[in-house]
Image: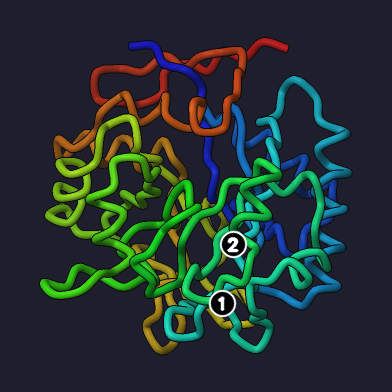
Amino acid sequence: MRTKLLIDQHIHGAYGVDFNKAAAEDILYLSKELLQNGIGGYFPTLVTDNIMNIKHQIEVIKKAASAQTPDMAKILGIHLEGIFLNVEKCGVHNPKYFLKPTIENYQMVEDSFIKIVTLAPEFDDGLIRYLWNKGVRVQAGHCISGHLTGCRGVTHIFNAMSGIPHRGVSTALSALINDSIYTEVIGDGVHVSDDALKLVFRMKPAEKVILISDSLPITKSNLNEMIFSDSKVYYDGVRATTKEGTIAGSTALLPDIIKRLHSVKLFNPQYIENPYKYHNIVLPGYIEWDEQWNIVDVVHNS
Protein backbone atom coordinates (compact mmCIF):
# COMPACT_ATOMS: atom_id res chain seq x y z
CA MET A 1 0.00 0.00 0.00
CA ARG A 2 1.17 3.48 -0.79
CA THR A 3 0.24 6.73 0.96
CA LYS A 4 1.51 10.26 1.22
CA LEU A 5 4.15 11.02 3.82
CA LEU A 6 2.79 11.64 7.31
CA ILE A 7 2.32 15.09 8.82
CA ASP A 8 2.37 15.51 12.59
CA GLN A 9 0.92 18.84 13.71
CA HIS A 10 1.33 18.19 17.43
CA ILE A 11 4.70 16.87 18.55
CA HIS A 12 6.80 18.10 21.49
CA GLY A 13 9.90 16.12 20.61
CA ALA A 14 11.40 12.64 20.41
CA TYR A 15 14.80 10.92 20.52
CA GLY A 16 15.65 13.05 23.58
CA VAL A 17 14.98 16.35 21.78
CA ASP A 18 12.66 18.84 23.53
CA PHE A 19 11.48 21.75 21.37
CA ASN A 20 11.24 24.00 24.44
CA LYS A 21 14.95 23.48 25.11
CA ALA A 22 16.62 22.22 21.94
CA ALA A 23 19.35 23.85 19.91
CA ALA A 24 18.93 24.10 16.13
CA GLU A 25 21.38 21.22 15.64
CA ASP A 26 19.25 18.95 17.83
CA ILE A 27 16.13 19.81 15.84
CA LEU A 28 17.92 19.01 12.58
CA TYR A 29 18.99 15.65 14.00
CA LEU A 30 15.41 14.90 15.01
CA SER A 31 14.14 15.96 11.58
CA LYS A 32 16.28 13.24 9.97
CA GLU A 33 14.96 10.62 12.38
CA LEU A 34 11.37 11.66 11.77
CA LEU A 35 11.65 11.33 8.00
CA GLN A 36 13.03 7.82 8.43
CA ASN A 37 9.78 7.13 10.31
CA GLY A 38 7.71 8.32 7.37
CA ILE A 39 6.98 11.76 8.77
CA GLY A 40 7.48 14.16 5.90
CA GLY A 41 6.46 17.32 7.71
CA TYR A 42 5.74 18.48 11.23
CA PHE A 43 4.90 21.42 13.45
CA PRO A 44 7.23 21.63 16.48
CA THR A 45 4.88 22.19 19.40
CA LEU A 46 5.79 24.49 22.28
CA VAL A 47 4.32 23.97 25.73
CA THR A 48 3.66 26.73 28.22
CA ASP A 49 6.84 28.54 29.23
CA ASN A 50 8.01 32.01 30.11
CA ILE A 51 7.71 34.56 27.31
CA MET A 52 11.47 34.98 26.89
CA ASN A 53 12.05 31.28 26.33
CA ILE A 54 9.12 30.93 23.95
CA LYS A 55 10.50 33.80 21.87
CA HIS A 56 13.98 32.26 21.97
CA GLN A 57 12.79 28.81 20.90
CA ILE A 58 10.75 30.27 18.06
CA GLU A 59 13.98 31.73 16.71
CA VAL A 60 15.81 28.43 17.24
CA ILE A 61 13.14 26.51 15.34
CA LYS A 62 13.22 29.04 12.51
CA LYS A 63 17.00 28.73 12.34
CA ALA A 64 16.68 24.96 12.06
CA ALA A 65 13.99 25.29 9.39
CA SER A 66 16.26 27.49 7.28
CA ALA A 67 19.08 24.93 7.45
CA GLN A 68 17.11 21.83 6.51
CA THR A 69 18.24 19.39 3.82
CA PRO A 70 16.17 16.97 1.68
CA ASP A 71 16.83 14.05 4.04
CA MET A 72 14.82 15.71 6.81
CA ALA A 73 11.16 15.98 7.74
CA LYS A 74 10.17 19.50 6.78
CA ILE A 75 9.43 21.96 9.58
CA LEU A 76 6.09 23.42 8.44
CA GLY A 77 5.58 25.98 11.17
CA ILE A 78 5.13 26.17 14.93
CA HIS A 79 2.22 24.97 17.02
CA LEU A 80 1.94 27.22 20.08
CA GLU A 81 0.05 25.06 22.54
CA GLY A 82 0.92 26.98 25.67
CA ILE A 83 0.20 30.17 27.62
CA PHE A 84 -3.46 30.86 26.67
CA LEU A 85 -5.00 27.92 28.55
CA ASN A 86 -7.43 27.31 31.41
CA VAL A 87 -5.87 26.40 34.76
CA GLU A 88 -8.76 23.97 35.38
CA LYS A 89 -7.52 21.90 32.42
CA CYS A 90 -3.81 22.65 32.56
CA GLY A 91 -2.60 19.06 32.35
CA VAL A 92 1.18 19.08 32.61
CA HIS A 93 1.44 22.76 31.59
CA ASN A 94 2.73 25.13 34.26
CA PRO A 95 -0.15 27.54 35.00
CA LYS A 96 2.10 30.21 36.49
CA TYR A 97 2.90 31.28 32.93
CA PHE A 98 -0.72 31.38 31.69
CA LEU A 99 -1.94 34.63 30.14
CA LYS A 100 -5.34 35.79 29.00
CA PRO A 101 -5.77 35.30 25.24
CA THR A 102 -5.66 38.93 24.21
CA ILE A 103 -4.13 40.49 21.12
CA GLU A 104 -1.66 42.41 23.27
CA ASN A 105 -0.44 39.28 25.05
CA TYR A 106 -0.10 37.35 21.82
CA GLN A 107 1.91 40.12 20.24
CA MET A 108 4.62 39.50 22.86
CA VAL A 109 5.43 36.21 21.06
CA GLU A 110 3.86 36.80 17.64
CA ASP A 111 5.74 35.45 14.66
CA SER A 112 4.62 34.59 11.14
CA PHE A 113 6.05 31.08 11.61
CA ILE A 114 3.37 30.30 14.23
CA LYS A 115 0.72 28.42 12.23
CA ILE A 116 -1.41 26.84 14.98
CA VAL A 117 -2.46 28.28 18.34
CA THR A 118 -4.23 26.24 21.02
CA LEU A 119 -6.19 28.37 23.47
CA ALA A 120 -9.12 28.36 25.89
CA PRO A 121 -11.92 30.15 24.02
CA GLU A 122 -13.82 30.91 27.24
CA PHE A 123 -11.22 33.59 28.00
CA ASP A 124 -10.93 35.02 24.50
CA ASP A 125 -10.70 38.79 24.25
CA GLY A 126 -10.46 39.34 20.52
CA LEU A 127 -7.52 37.02 19.86
CA ILE A 128 -9.46 34.36 17.95
CA ARG A 129 -10.64 36.83 15.31
CA TYR A 130 -7.17 38.40 15.17
CA LEU A 131 -5.55 35.00 14.48
CA TRP A 132 -8.28 33.99 12.02
CA ASN A 133 -7.65 37.13 9.99
CA LYS A 134 -3.95 36.28 9.85
CA GLY A 135 -4.58 32.73 8.65
CA VAL A 136 -3.46 31.06 11.88
CA ARG A 137 -5.35 27.86 12.75
CA VAL A 138 -7.03 28.40 16.12
CA GLN A 139 -7.79 25.27 18.14
CA ALA A 140 -9.71 24.93 21.38
CA GLY A 141 -7.77 23.00 23.96
CA HIS A 142 -7.01 22.82 27.67
CA CYS A 143 -10.40 24.45 28.12
CA ILE A 144 -14.02 23.97 29.21
CA SER A 145 -15.91 26.09 26.67
CA GLY A 146 -18.40 24.51 24.32
CA HIS A 147 -18.57 27.62 22.18
CA LEU A 148 -16.08 27.14 19.37
CA THR A 149 -16.89 30.09 17.11
CA GLY A 150 -13.77 31.01 15.18
CA CYS A 151 -11.94 27.80 16.06
CA ARG A 152 -10.83 25.61 13.17
CA GLY A 153 -10.21 22.59 15.37
CA VAL A 154 -9.80 21.11 18.83
CA THR A 155 -6.58 19.92 20.40
CA HIS A 156 -6.29 16.23 21.48
CA ILE A 157 -9.99 15.53 21.98
CA PHE A 158 -11.11 14.31 25.43
CA ASN A 159 -7.74 15.20 26.95
CA ALA A 160 -7.56 18.39 29.04
CA MET A 161 -11.04 19.56 28.04
CA SER A 162 -14.63 19.30 29.26
CA GLY A 163 -16.11 15.93 28.31
CA ILE A 164 -19.62 14.89 27.21
CA PRO A 165 -22.44 15.98 29.54
CA HIS A 166 -26.07 15.12 28.95
CA ARG A 167 -27.05 18.68 29.84
CA GLY A 168 -25.39 21.84 28.64
CA VAL A 169 -22.43 22.20 26.31
CA SER A 170 -18.79 21.16 26.41
CA THR A 171 -15.67 21.27 24.27
CA ALA A 172 -15.71 17.59 23.33
CA LEU A 173 -19.44 17.53 22.62
CA SER A 174 -19.28 20.63 20.44
CA ALA A 175 -16.35 19.19 18.50
CA LEU A 176 -18.14 15.92 17.85
CA ILE A 177 -21.41 17.41 16.60
CA ASN A 178 -19.84 20.17 14.50
CA ASP A 179 -18.84 18.68 11.15
CA SER A 180 -16.68 21.68 10.25
CA ILE A 181 -14.31 21.27 13.22
CA TYR A 182 -11.05 19.42 12.68
CA THR A 183 -10.39 17.11 15.60
CA GLU A 184 -6.96 16.06 16.85
CA VAL A 185 -6.88 12.47 18.13
CA ILE A 186 -4.14 10.66 20.06
CA GLY A 187 -4.71 7.00 19.18
CA ASP A 188 -1.91 5.51 21.28
CA GLY A 189 -4.26 3.48 23.50
CA VAL A 190 -3.27 5.51 26.56
CA HIS A 191 -4.87 8.91 26.08
CA VAL A 192 -8.24 7.75 24.76
CA SER A 193 -9.96 4.37 25.18
CA ASP A 194 -10.86 2.37 22.11
CA ASP A 195 -14.57 2.84 22.82
CA ALA A 196 -14.11 6.61 22.95
CA LEU A 197 -12.08 6.42 19.72
CA LYS A 198 -14.95 4.52 18.09
CA LEU A 199 -17.28 7.33 19.12
CA VAL A 200 -15.01 9.97 17.57
CA PHE A 201 -14.53 8.05 14.33
CA ARG A 202 -18.26 7.36 13.98
CA MET A 203 -19.33 10.92 14.81
CA LYS A 204 -16.76 12.91 12.86
CA PRO A 205 -16.56 13.03 9.07
CA ALA A 206 -13.48 10.99 8.17
CA GLU A 207 -11.90 14.02 6.49
CA LYS A 208 -12.00 16.00 9.75
CA VAL A 209 -9.91 13.62 11.87
CA ILE A 210 -6.29 14.67 12.48
CA LEU A 211 -4.09 11.94 13.95
CA ILE A 212 -1.33 13.37 16.14
CA SER A 213 1.39 11.86 18.26
CA ASP A 214 1.65 14.45 21.06
CA SER A 215 5.05 12.80 21.36
CA LEU A 216 7.31 13.68 24.26
CA PRO A 217 11.11 14.06 24.08
CA ILE A 218 11.32 10.73 25.92
CA THR A 219 9.90 8.91 22.86
CA LYS A 220 12.41 6.65 21.07
CA SER A 221 15.08 7.49 23.64
CA ASN A 222 16.75 5.54 26.43
CA LEU A 223 15.32 7.89 29.05
CA ASN A 224 12.88 6.70 31.70
CA GLU A 225 12.48 10.07 33.39
CA MET A 226 12.93 13.71 32.43
CA ILE A 227 11.87 17.26 33.20
CA PHE A 228 9.14 18.39 30.83
CA SER A 229 7.23 21.65 31.21
CA ASP A 230 8.80 22.11 34.66
CA SER A 231 7.46 18.74 35.84
CA LYS A 232 9.30 15.49 36.53
CA VAL A 233 7.92 12.90 34.12
CA TYR A 234 8.36 9.16 34.57
CA TYR A 235 8.11 6.56 31.81
CA ASP A 236 7.18 3.01 32.85
CA GLY A 237 7.39 1.48 29.39
CA VAL A 238 3.72 2.16 28.62
CA ARG A 239 2.93 5.72 29.62
CA ALA A 240 4.71 8.88 30.72
CA THR A 241 3.18 10.59 33.74
CA THR A 242 3.96 12.93 36.59
CA LYS A 243 4.19 11.50 40.10
CA GLU A 244 0.55 12.57 40.55
CA GLY A 245 -0.44 10.41 37.58
CA THR A 246 -1.09 13.18 35.06
CA ILE A 247 -0.36 11.96 31.52
CA ALA A 248 2.32 14.26 30.10
CA GLY A 249 2.07 13.23 26.45
CA SER A 250 2.56 10.15 24.34
CA THR A 251 5.60 7.94 23.82
CA ALA A 252 4.69 6.92 20.28
CA LEU A 253 5.26 8.39 16.85
CA LEU A 254 2.56 8.49 14.18
CA PRO A 255 3.55 5.20 12.46
CA ASP A 256 3.23 3.40 15.82
CA ILE A 257 -0.21 4.93 16.32
CA ILE A 258 -1.35 3.98 12.81
CA LYS A 259 -0.23 0.38 13.31
CA ARG A 260 -2.05 0.22 16.63
CA LEU A 261 -5.27 1.68 15.22
CA HIS A 262 -5.14 -0.84 12.39
CA SER A 263 -4.71 -3.68 14.90
CA VAL A 264 -7.99 -2.72 16.59
CA LYS A 265 -9.72 -2.08 13.25
CA LEU A 266 -10.01 1.68 13.73
CA PHE A 267 -7.65 3.04 11.10
CA ASN A 268 -8.81 4.83 7.97
CA PRO A 269 -6.15 5.86 5.39
CA GLN A 270 -8.13 9.07 4.86
CA TYR A 271 -6.65 10.28 8.15
CA ILE A 272 -3.23 10.57 6.49
CA GLU A 273 -4.64 12.91 3.85
CA ASN A 274 -6.38 15.32 6.21
CA PRO A 275 -3.47 17.49 7.47
CA TYR A 276 -2.59 18.26 3.86
CA LYS A 277 -5.99 19.83 3.30
CA TYR A 278 -6.17 21.48 6.72
CA HIS A 279 -2.90 23.31 6.15
CA ASN A 280 -3.01 23.51 2.34
CA ILE A 281 0.33 21.69 2.10
CA VAL A 282 2.02 19.75 -0.69
CA LEU A 283 4.91 17.43 0.18
CA PRO A 284 6.75 15.26 -2.35
CA GLY A 285 7.34 11.62 -1.55
CA TYR A 286 5.40 8.63 -0.28
CA ILE A 287 5.39 5.65 2.07
CA GLU A 288 5.09 1.99 1.14
CA TRP A 289 3.32 -0.10 3.81
CA ASP A 290 2.76 -3.82 4.24
CA GLU A 291 -0.68 -5.27 4.98
CA GLN A 292 -0.25 -4.77 8.73
CA TRP A 293 0.66 -1.11 8.27
CA ASN A 294 4.34 -1.52 8.96
CA ILE A 295 6.52 0.83 6.95
CA VAL A 296 8.37 -0.95 4.18
CA ASP A 297 9.95 2.05 2.49
CA VAL A 298 10.00 5.84 2.71
CA VAL A 299 10.60 7.70 -0.54
CA HIS A 300 11.23 11.43 -0.37
CA ASN A 301 11.94 13.80 -3.20
CA SER A 302 13.81 17.07 -2.88
Q: Is residue 282 above or below residue 238?
A: above
Q: Nearer the viewer, mark 2 or mark 1?
A: 2
Q: Secondary structure at mark 1?
A: loop
Q: What residue appears at the point 40 percent right and 40 percent down from the top-left corner?
A: 210
- The picture places residue 42, in percent across and down from the top left corner, at 61, 38
> Residue beneath label 2, please?
81
Of residue 55 and residue 13, the one placed in the foreground of this image is: 55
Q: What residue appears at the point 68 percent right and 71 percent down from the top-left corner?
A: 102
Of residue 232 and residue 160, the one placed in the foreground of this image is: 160
Q: Quadrant of residue 21?
A: bottom right
- The picture places residue 130, in percent across and down from the top left corner, at 68, 55
Q: Is residue 213 shown left or right of residue 35?
A: left
Kind of residue at disc 2: Glu
Q: How is the image coloured?
A: rainbow
Q: Is residue 129 above or below residue 69?
A: below
Q: Is residue 120 above or below residue 37?
A: below
- The picture places residue 170, in percent across and down from the top left corner, at 28, 69
> Residue beneath label 1, please?
93
Kind of residue at disc 1: His
Q: What residue appears at the point 61 percent right and 55 percent down from the top-left corner?
A: 129
Q: Secondary structure at mark 2?
A: loop
Q: Quadrant of residue 23?
A: bottom right
Instruction: Work out whether mark 2 precedes mark 1 in sequence or the reverse, and give the earlier one.
Output: 2
Q: Is residue 122 shown left or right of residue 166?
A: right
Q: What residue appears at the point 54 percent right and 60 percent down from the top-left corner?
A: 216
**How dense is the environment of label 2, judged by Cα within 10 Å: few (below 14), some, or many (20 and up)?**
many
Is mark 2 in CB contact (under 8 Å) with mark 1?
Answer: yes
Disc number for residue 251: none
- The picture places residue 191, in percent across and down from the top left corner, at 32, 62
- Specify the quadrant that holds the C terminus: top right
Q: In whole angstroms, how far apart are the C-alphas of marks 2 and 1?
A: 9 Å
**How dense is the environment of label 1, judged by Cα within 10 Å: few (below 14), some, or many (20 and up)?**
many
